Image (cartoon, rainbow, N blue to C red):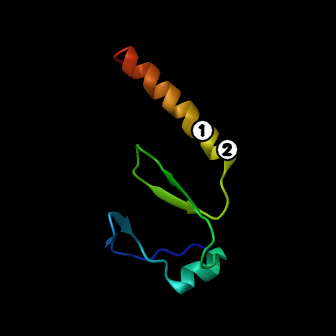
Amino acid sequence: MELEIERKISKVGNSLGITLPAEIAKIAEVELGETVYLTVNSISKEITIRKNPQKEDSFKEMVRDIVESYLRERNL
């Protein structure tokens, strides 16, 4: 099941915040005080929130960063 809900970004101290609707928290099985992990795709600007870190995604990001760095150095 995939659910998309629009939210506005608000100011929380010196940071920005987004509230997590109860319906989303229930589907994702997250609770108050639980740690979640954010992943940002620098190309698509997509932000993913996960309950558990995904090592595969971290590896993909590392490879992508290495390739981007190589291409920048070579002016490609």
Q: Identify which residue, 75 or 1, lies in the foreground.
A: 75
Q: Are marks 2 and 1 in contact (CB under 8 Å)?
A: yes
Q: Which residue is mark 2?
A: 56
The correct choice, above or below, for 16 with respect to 8 in the image is above
Residue 53 lies left or right of residue 17; in this view the side is right
Which residue lies at the image location 38% right of the left edge and 75% below the top edge? 7
Residue 47 lies left or right of residue 7; in this view the side is right
Which residue lies at the image location 49% right of the left edge and 77% below the top edge? 20
Where residue 40 appears, as percent x and y from the top left, is 47, 51
Give the quarter of the figure containing the N terminus: bottom right
Residue 60 lies left or right of residue 75; in this view the side is right
Q: Residues within 10 Å of mark 2 (few under 14, many from 20)?
A: few
Amino acid of disc 2: Glu
Which residue lies at the image location 67% right of the left edge and 77% below the top edge? 29
Which residue lies at the image location 33% right of the left edge and 74% below the top edge? 8
The outermost residue toward the front is 13
